[in-house]
Amino acid sequence: MKKLFIPAILLLAIQIQSCQSNSSSNSSSTTDSSYVDTTHTSQNSLDWAGTYDGIVPCADCSGIKTTITLKDDDSFTYQAEYLEKNTSVQDSGKFMWHDNGSIVHLMGKDLNTKYKVGENILIQLDTEGKVIEGAIAEKYYLNKVQ
């Protein structure tokens, strides 16, 4: 009886070890499939340089026709025309990349605003640097024109 008991214990130990090895290898394959790529960003993966325009909402007019040009040397030009008010704003300066290369921060003489950079689009962010949500969210999109 003792001769059968020791091999049975060894066999049981090997089976338990085998099950633990499988479960740890399965969890690593799950991690691999949910891998987040942090090396490819808007800054280094998209053709972001160019001119973007659109009409964004305005509190006391029918909209603000906005044109932004981003240049490869990290400079920008900004033009905004307040429709039906005969008022316009122009600014230029340098921009910085934030949030691992997905957000540009435009800082000029009078301008201090952030945009999320997407494929042929700039998305104006709110004052806290977050994407504007809700029914009018798409009204804050500037589309690339060149």
Image (cartoon, rainbow, N blue to C red):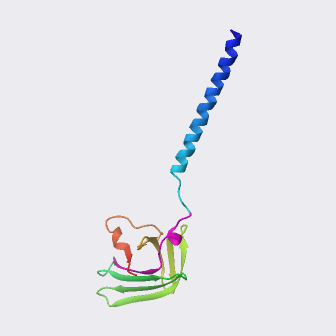
Residue 28 to residue 106: above or below: above
* Residue shown at 46% from the left, 70% from the top: 116
Residue in the foreground of this view, choosing between 40 and 88: 40
* Residue shown at 35% from the left, 89% from the top: 87
Q: Which residues are magenta?
A: 39-56
52 in the magenta segment: yes
Q: In what quadrant of the picture does the C terminus appear? A: bottom left
75 displayed left or right of 87: right
**Quadrant of the rendered structure where residue 53 is?**
bottom left
127 displayed left or right of 29: left
Farthest residue, direction top = 1
Residue 74 location (% of width, % of height): 54, 81
Residue 96 location (% of width, % of height): 55, 76
47 in the magenta segment: yes
* Circle count: 0
Residue 14 to residue 143: above or below: above
Residue in the foreground of this view, choosing between 104 and 59: 104
Residue 93 to residue 47: above or below: below
* Residue shown at 54% from the left, 73% from the top: 97
Farthest residue, direction bottom = 86
Residue in the foreground of this view, choosing between 64 and 48: 48
Q: In what quadrant of the picture does the N terminus appear? A: top right
4 displayed left or right of 99: right
Residue in the foreground of this view, choosing between 21 and 122: 21
Residue 63 location (% of width, % of height): 32, 80
* Residue shown at 46% from the left, 71% from the top: 117
